Image: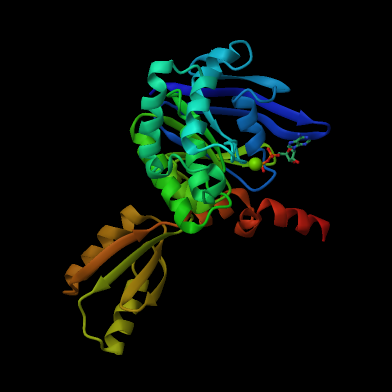
């Protein structure tokens, strides 16, 4: 796999604050990569350095092979940037915004209209192309912001908190569009403080806190890493007889590798040390006792569970948005 973004000890210091603290990242071409962390973790600062808006204090980074400091023009040509606060013009129509962006990015004149039409259609804004952005909903405005960032067909797009401040439905639509965009080959680097979003959207996630990368992997890898106890959920075709349930429960509890057991409706949850050792033993037990298995599943902790275990942070801290954070720190 090709590495399209690479950072080496990338660092940004503001006075005595290490906003970004020697981070090493490698993002592969074609992936959706998420930087997940609470407010103030260093996400925006990282994006600003990678997109050439601010200079690192220390360290290096490359985009599409170009050094972001010494080959900044080439690096910038390869990227699209969607900042946290929309940069489209309210007084202009969607169409005018796209054509204006095309001019800024030196898209050849002959291609501007074609590209604008493509993007308006892709982002579901074609019917509204003549409307002023001032009349757009937040979700529409966000979609247009992403569209303008793609006008010059960049290989990589950076999005800083692409769904923050949007309602559930608009957020969902943005995530679907980003997935579709990624399928066309665009590498996506995004930041988020929504654990769910990182889980649903990203191929790989780097968890950042206080400027440091503290965990990195696919959502499933992170969940596995945090997994201390494995859970097997199993249900049988048995009568609704309470005694029969209790009897089975007691026998299951005594099997090797089974630490404990709980019953949820018609399902048994077995907490085991090792799933691959425990499953054959459970199956064997069922066969010997003529128990017909209806379903058997292994359950993983949620990414939120994993996040809590890996970072030691409370999931509540992730739910603090910028404005409320200010209020909290005042009080
Ligand atoms: N221009 C700046 N001047 C001083 N401190 C800053 C500046 N920008 C960010 N910081 C500080 O750097 C840290 C990381 O901020 P930021 O990158 O915005 O985090 P995030 O995007 O994860 O919320 C915070 O402590 C923030 O207060
Ligand atoms: Mg930010």
Question: Which quadrant does the C terminus fall into?
Answer: bottom right
Between 326 and 111, the residue placed more toward the observer is 111
Residue 120 relative to residue 137: left or right: left
Asked whether the viewer can see residue 225, the reply is no
How far across and how far down the image is residue 16, in percent? 83, 33
How far across and how far down the image is residue 185, in percent? 36, 29
Colour pattern of the rendering: rainbow
Residue at 39% from the left image edge and 34% from the top image edge: 119
Asked whether the viewer can see residue 91, the reply is yes
How far across and how far down the image is residue 109, in percent? 43, 17
Figure quadrant of residue 17: top right
Between 185 and 200, the residue placed more toward the observer is 185
Figure quadrant of residue 61: top right
Between 287 and 24, the residue placed more toward the observer is 24
Residue 132 relative to residue 320: left or right: left
How far across and how far down the image is residue 146, in percent? 49, 36
Question: Total marks drawn?
Answer: 0
Question: Which quadrant does the N terminus fall into?
Answer: top left
Residue at 64% from the left image edge and 30% from the top image edge: 48
Residue 234 vs 132, above or below: the answer is: below
Between 194 and 186, the residue placed more toward the observer is 186
Residue at 69% from the left image edge and 33% from the top image edge: 20
- In the picture as drawn, the residue positioned furthest to the top comes out as 70
The quadrant where ligand 1 appears is: top right
Residue at 37% from the left image edge and 72% from the top image edge: 253
Residue 278 vs 13, above or below: the answer is: below
Figure quadrant of residue 239: bottom left
Residue 19 vs 260, above or below: the answer is: above
Residue 142 relative to residue 331: left or right: left
């Amino acid at each position: 796999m090709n590495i399209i973004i690479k950072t080496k000890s990338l660092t940004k210091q503001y006075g005595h604050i290490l906003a970004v603290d020697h981070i090493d990242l490698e993002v592969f071409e074609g992936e959706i990569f998420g930087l997940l962390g609470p407010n103030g973790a260093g996400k925006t600062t990282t994006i600003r350095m990678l997109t050439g808006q601010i200079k690192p204090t220390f360290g290096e980074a490359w985009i599409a092979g170009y050094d972001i400091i010494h080959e900044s023009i080439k690096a910038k040509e390869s990227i699209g940037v969607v900042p946290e606060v929309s940069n489209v013009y309210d007084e202009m129509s969607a169409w005018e915004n796209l054509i204006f962006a095309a001019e800024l990015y030196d898209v050849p004149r002959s291609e501007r209209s074609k590209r604008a039409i493509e993007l308006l259609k892709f982002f579901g804004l074609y019917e509204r192309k003549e409307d002023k952005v001032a009349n757009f909903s937040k979700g529409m405005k966000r979609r247009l912001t992403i569209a303008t960032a793609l006008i010059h067909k960049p290989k990589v797009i950076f999005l800083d908190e692409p769904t923050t401040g949007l309602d559930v439905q608009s957020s969902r639509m943005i995530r679907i569009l980003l997935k579709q965009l990624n399928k066309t080959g665009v590498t996506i680097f995004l930041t988020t403080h929504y654990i769910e979003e990182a889980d649903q959207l990203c191929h790989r996630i780097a968890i950042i806190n206080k400027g440091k990368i503290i965990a990195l992997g696919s959502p499933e890898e992170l969940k596995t890493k945090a997994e201390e106890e494995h859970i097997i959920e199993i249900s049988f075709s048995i009568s609704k007889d309470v005694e029969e349930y209790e009897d089975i429960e007691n026998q299951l509890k005594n099997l090797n590798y089974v630490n404990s057991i709980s019953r949820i409706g018609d399902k048994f949850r077995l907490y085991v040390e090792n799933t691959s050792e425990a499953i054959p033993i459970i199956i064997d037990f069922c066969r010997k006792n003529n128990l017909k298995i209806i379903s058997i599943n292994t359950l993983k902790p949620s990414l939120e569970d994993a996040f809590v275990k890996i970072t030691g942070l409370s999931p509540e801290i992730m739910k603090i948005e910028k404005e409320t954070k200010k209020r909290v720190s005042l009080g």
